[in-house]
Image (cartoon, grey):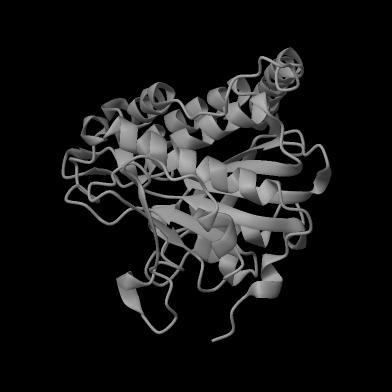
Amino acid sequence: MPVSLKRSFSRLLAGAAAVALAGCAGLAAGPSAPPLVVSSDQLMADVTVLSADDMQGRAIGTEGNRMARDYILRRFAEEGLQPVDDDYLLPFTAAPTARRPTALEGINVAGVVRGTTHPDRWIIVTAHYDHEGVRDGQIYNGADDNASGTAALFELARLLRLSPPRHSVMLVALDGEERGLLGAQAFVRSPPVPLDAVVLNINLDMVARGDNGILWVVGSRPYPGLVPLIDGLAQQPGVERRYGYDDPAVTGRNNWVMLSDQGAFHAAGVPFVFFSVDDHADYHQPSDDAERINAAWYRGSIQTAHDALRAVDATDDLDLRATRAVH
């Protein structure tokens, strides 16, 4: 959209965010504050919209991608997120490469909740919103990959609004992951906050289809300080947490450290934890649709991610960089 229109839209969204925050400011402090429980209904409502056929698979640079981004902007404002530096949109250009001879224009979307105790220390939660688009006339809807992670951003924002965090939290819908972590790489090249102020990156990519019951927790080998935090989380029904896929002696697709957006943060020295599921029969297929998601399992997966965020937020002077394993 034109810059002037984009600025006006961002100001409108910022106003909506301010109203939402003001309206809920007293809610968390009151004795009747609701429990911080993830809503499966809201998760499924959002993932269904984002993975609908009219989003056209959300490939970077397409009309469907723009439509998904507009939805993300609206939901960020509805859940009370504030813009970053007066704008939710963080556009970037990915330079041509030998395998991709033309530049790609993408746009990350970021919203923040300011911390009450450590406003200058950050937890950054990421999920990519792009997918594969349309191929040979078939729409690759990407419900699990990664409408599921994107929808989780809205639900986390809702819970952070109900009970404001001690650290500042930035929720970022990243573009261009499917083309090589483009949005994440652009983010760490030009971060809106200093990277040395980031306590942890929590990345959510494919978090709804635990068909085998397993939610993988990746990052404990490079950052063993994560283990006591994760071990202390409540166990969600039917969701089996397992550490793995981060052994430095293993290469290829059995090492996930660099295979999703957390890889860009890790390469920049930012600690991470990555939540994901094993590849399933619908991975990168036109059949990755919302109706194949088990809503109860998806809820438990995102409750785990939320509880991990709260555990990190509750820990003063957490320095996972100091625990980084050397191999």
- Residue at point 32%, 32% (across, down): 296
The x and y percentages for residue 205 are 41, 50
Is there any visible trace of residue 290 in the rendered image? yes
- Residue at point 44%, 53% (across, down): 275
- Residue at point 42%, 45% (across, down): 60
Question: Can you tell which quarter of the image residue 287 is in?
Answer: top left
In terms of depth relative to the viewer, which is nearer, 42 or 98?
Answer: 42
Quarter holding the C terminus is: bottom right
Q: Is residue 179 left or right of residue 191?
A: left
- Image height of 305 relative to 218, above or below: above
Q: Is residue 223 left or right of residue 143?
A: right
In terms of depth relative to the viewer, which is nearer, 293 or 215?
Answer: 215
Question: Can you tell which quarter of the image residue 59 is in?
Answer: top left
In terms of depth relative to the viewer, which is nearer, 274 or 171?
Answer: 274
Question: Can you tell which quarter of the image residue 131 is in?
Answer: top left
Quarter holding the N terminus is: top right
- Residue at point 23%, 41% (across, down): 288
The x and y percentages for residue 161 are 66, 26
Is there any visible trace of residue 108 in the rendered image? no
